């Protein structure tokens, strides 16, 4: 049954795709959308394209406007300015019940007075679907989210994970063009969250549907989404694949928001053979690869992820390392945090600056670990630093 | 630890017993004396249902009881309708200008001395030259009990997750339909509880009713009060016992309804 559903969903998206290719439009286009609440601008002249079949994540700290943006897509808020185009049609002023999108709510918002079956059938009944068809569709959805046997239960007789599935089934039942998910996994515990993430991804792939998820959990966004839009103060700070977001952040803010990072501010003193030399107060002269976009500013920030900073006792492990280890600082171990798979170190450099380094614990026995106050060399390759101009 | 939490200490037991006795001893005495065979109120003459039989043969008293029940039923229904609408307006409406003032004004009968409400209503009815009787008492009771309805229903509405209605709209309901299909079924127990509360309040009101009623349409409390002034007949005890029974049933039902209502949502309605 699920396969059948997948087939029909795929079918409709192929049609849609063909149509869109002709007009060269993304499935969803947000154009200069602004939303104000009194004096507070929640979403500020934001533009974004989401393609059909994408799993797109809106990531940001609380209050950045990501939920407001999602609610504007669902129709619960009306933009003050701008357009929201869904398959070419402006839906910015369309009422929620007339939009071909559905939303899965953060707290699931299951109707407590209705059974699982009636919750899932709710939207189908409103659409005026025939009785037999509704029964078939509900059965499909129940099978899809693996809730067989629980159809007659009321929401308060379900576990958190089961409720989440009902909410998902209910929002998928109408086969929306876009499914909006507002922090769908926030209420689940860690283990359940991880397995549900995998199931959501699998489901999205199988149905070929467009998912837009709002989350404040960057790991969740990284795991599930094919593209992530990082929001800050009502604007998109960067839209990129998870890998680009982490390895090539667009700004200092993004670099700091996504994952851990060492930042060194300094002045560009030379550029030759694709290498930039930056003199920094914290770590002296750093050599980094020049980015594709030529650097225009004099003062830049060099960002290096902690796992790219390697540690060694004395000398260098190999000749290859010697070639790469142009950036090499002496210091001593100031702090050790054992995290299971990884160990995070803080190294106090001899000039007083502190850098963070993360090493994978590849051996069970602690032969490679560094002790507190041990003298070490911290180094990184020029390619591992990112030059940020803002 | 668990012992001290779960079991009442001697002091707590005594305090509880004294408190309950203070509240209920007069009522218990009244109930017992309603079964008194003696004509004298303070002399026990053995068990008897005599005064109940007397009551059911007392036309004037029965008429007053019937009047009270009708007033209570009609005014509770009107108050529930108006009060629920006000509650919806306050809990769900956009923040309109004067919203705080409106809600404050709505609750004023809660704190207004009944004598003042009664007097002002009397002046109004006199000014309108309305014939005082069933309808004037009913309208007066509606204004009295409406605010209680609003309090009960509004607290249920505000405890209700707003996203339920949004989910309904998301799934194809227009706002009115979303209210009817999702919100209303969830607040019905609170509305029922509010109706019963309004009914009870109307049933035992004496002050406002005596201001607004006219000749020949005395409610039961008015009737009882005027009888008592001529001396307490044991029949009054019987009537009061029946009253207590009715009100107890209603209050138990009302609290049961509001329990039901809260078990369906996250937090409880008052009562």
Image (cartoon, helix red, strand yellow):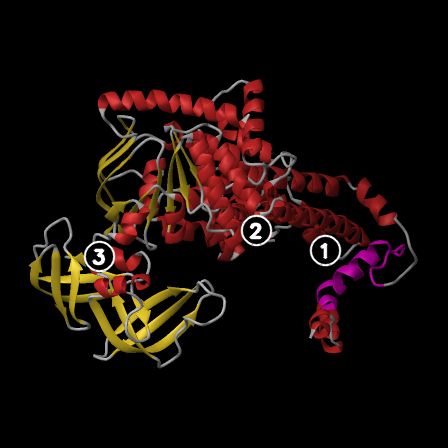
Residue at the right extreme, as displayed: B46
Residue A317 image point, x, y percent: 31, 68
Residue A151 image point, x, y percent: 62, 34
Residue at disc 3, secondary structure: helix
In the figure, B260 relative to B112: above or below? Answer: above
Q: Nearer the viewer, residue A98 or A222?
A: A222
Residue named by callout 1: B228
Residue named by callout 2: B269
In the figure, A375 relative to A219: above or below? Answer: below
Q: Main secondary structure of the magenta part?
A: helix
Specify the subunit that label 2 lies on: B
Q: Tell us which disc is closer to us: 1 or 3.
A: 3
- Report the disc number at residue A383: 3
Residue at disc 2, secondary structure: loop
Which residue: 33% across, 22% down? Answer: A16
Q: Mark 2–mark 1 contact, CB under 8 Å?
A: no
- Report the disc number at residue A74: none
- Give the side of residue A297 with respect to residue B147, left or right: left
Could you tell me which quadrant the N terminus of chain B lies in?
Answer: bottom right
Specify start and end residues of the magenta stretch as a single range: B20-42
Residue at disc 1, secondary structure: helix
Which residue: 35% across, 80% down? Answer: A374
Specify the subunit that label 3 lies on: A
Q: Is residue B178 magenta?
A: no
Q: Is residue B33 magenta?
A: yes
Q: Quadrant of residue B31?
A: bottom right
Task: Tell me the distance, in whole angstroms, between the alpha carbons under discs 2 and 1.
Answer: 38 Å
Task: Tell me the distance, in whole angstroms, between the alpha carbons under discs 1 and 3.
Answer: 100 Å
Q: Mark 1–mark 3 contact, CB under 8 Å?
A: no
Q: Tell us which disc is closer to us: 3 or 2.
A: 3
How packed mark 1 is, by other alpha carbons closer than 10 Å (few <14, some 14-19, many 20 or more), is few
Which residue: 61% across, 44% down? Answer: A158
């Amino acid at each position: 049954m699920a396969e059948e559903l997948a087939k029909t969903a795929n079918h409709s998206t192929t049609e849609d795709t063909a149509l869109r290719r002709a007009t060269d439009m993304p499935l969803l286009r947000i154009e200069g959308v602004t939303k104000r609440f009194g004096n507070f601008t929640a979403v500020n002249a934001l533009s974004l394209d989401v393609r059909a079949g994408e799993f797109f994540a809106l990531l940001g700290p609380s209050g950045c406007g990501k939920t407001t943006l999602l609610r504007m897509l669902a129709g619960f808020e009306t933009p003050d300015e701008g357009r929201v185009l869904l398959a070419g049609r402006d839906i910015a002023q369309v009422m929620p019940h007339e939009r071909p999108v559905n939303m899965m709510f953060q707290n699931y918002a299951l109707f407590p007075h209705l059974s699982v079956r009636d919750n899932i059938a709710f939207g189908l009944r409103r659409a005026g679907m025939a009785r037999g068809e509704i029964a078939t569709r509900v059965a499909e959805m129940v099978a899809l989210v693996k809730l067989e046997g629980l159809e007659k239960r009321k929401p308060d007789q379900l576990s958190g994970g089961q409720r989440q599935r009902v909410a998902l089934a209910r929002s998928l039942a109408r086969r929306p063009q876009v499914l909006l998910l507002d922090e769908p996994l926030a209420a689940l515990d860690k283990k359940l969250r991880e397995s549900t993430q995998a199931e959501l991804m699998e489901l999205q792939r199988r149905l070929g549907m467009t998912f837009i998820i709002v989350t404040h959990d960057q790991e969740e966004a990284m795991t599930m989404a094919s593209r992530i839009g990082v929001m800050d103060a009502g604007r998109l700070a960067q839209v990129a694949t998870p890998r680009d977001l982490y390895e090539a952040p667009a700004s200092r803010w993004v670099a700091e928001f996504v994952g851990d990072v060492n930042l060194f501010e300094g002045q560009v003193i030379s550029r030759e053979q694709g290498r930039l030399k930056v003199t920094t107060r914290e770590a002296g002269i750093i050599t980094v690869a020049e980015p594709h976009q030529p650097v225009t500013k004099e003062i830049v920030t060099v960002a290096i992820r902690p796992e790219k900073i390697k540690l060694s006792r004395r000398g260098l492990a190999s000749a290859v390392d010697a070639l790469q280890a142009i950036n090499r600082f002496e210091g001593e171990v100031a702090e050790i945090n054992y995290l299971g798979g990884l160990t995070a170190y803080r190294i106090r450099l001899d000039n007083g600056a502190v850098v963070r380094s993360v090493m994978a614990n590849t051996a069970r026995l602690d032969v490679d670990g560094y002790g507190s106050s041990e003298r070490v060399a911290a180094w990184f390759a020029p390619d591992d630093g990112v030059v940020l101009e803002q | 630890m668990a012992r001290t939490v779960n079991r009442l200490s001697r002091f707590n037991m005594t305090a509880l017993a004294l408190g309950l006795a203070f509240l209920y001893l007069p009522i218990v005495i009244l109930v017992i004396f309603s079964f008194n065979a003696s004509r004298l109120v303070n002399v026990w003459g053995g068990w008897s249902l005599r005064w109940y039989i007397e009551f059911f043969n007392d036309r004037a008293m029965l008429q007053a009881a019937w009047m009270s029940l009708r007033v209570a039923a009609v005014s509770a229904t009107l108050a529930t309708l108006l009060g629920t609408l006000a509650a919806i307006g306050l809990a769900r409406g956009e923040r309109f200008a004067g919203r705080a003032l409106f809600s404050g004004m709505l609750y004023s009968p809660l704190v207004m001395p009944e004598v003042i409400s009664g007097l002002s209503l009397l002046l109004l009815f006199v000014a309108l030259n309305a014939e005082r009787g069933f309808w004037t008492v009913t309208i007066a009771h509606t204004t009295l009990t409406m605010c209680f309805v609003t309090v009960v229903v509004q607290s249920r509405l505000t405890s209700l997750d707003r996203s339920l209605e949004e989910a309904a709209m998301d799934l194809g309901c227009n706002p009115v339909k979303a209210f009817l299909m999702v919100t209303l079924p969830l607040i019905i127990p609170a509305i029922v509880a509010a109706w019963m509360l309004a009914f009870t309040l109307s049933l035992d009101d004496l002050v406002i009713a005596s201001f607004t009623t006219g000749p020949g349409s005395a409610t039961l409390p008015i009737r009882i009060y005027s009888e008592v002034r001529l001396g307490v007949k044991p029949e009054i005890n019987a009537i009061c016992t029946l009253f207590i029974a009715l009100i107890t049933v209603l209050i138990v039902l009302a609290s049961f309804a509001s329990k039901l209502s809260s078990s369906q949502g996250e937090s409880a309605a008052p009562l």
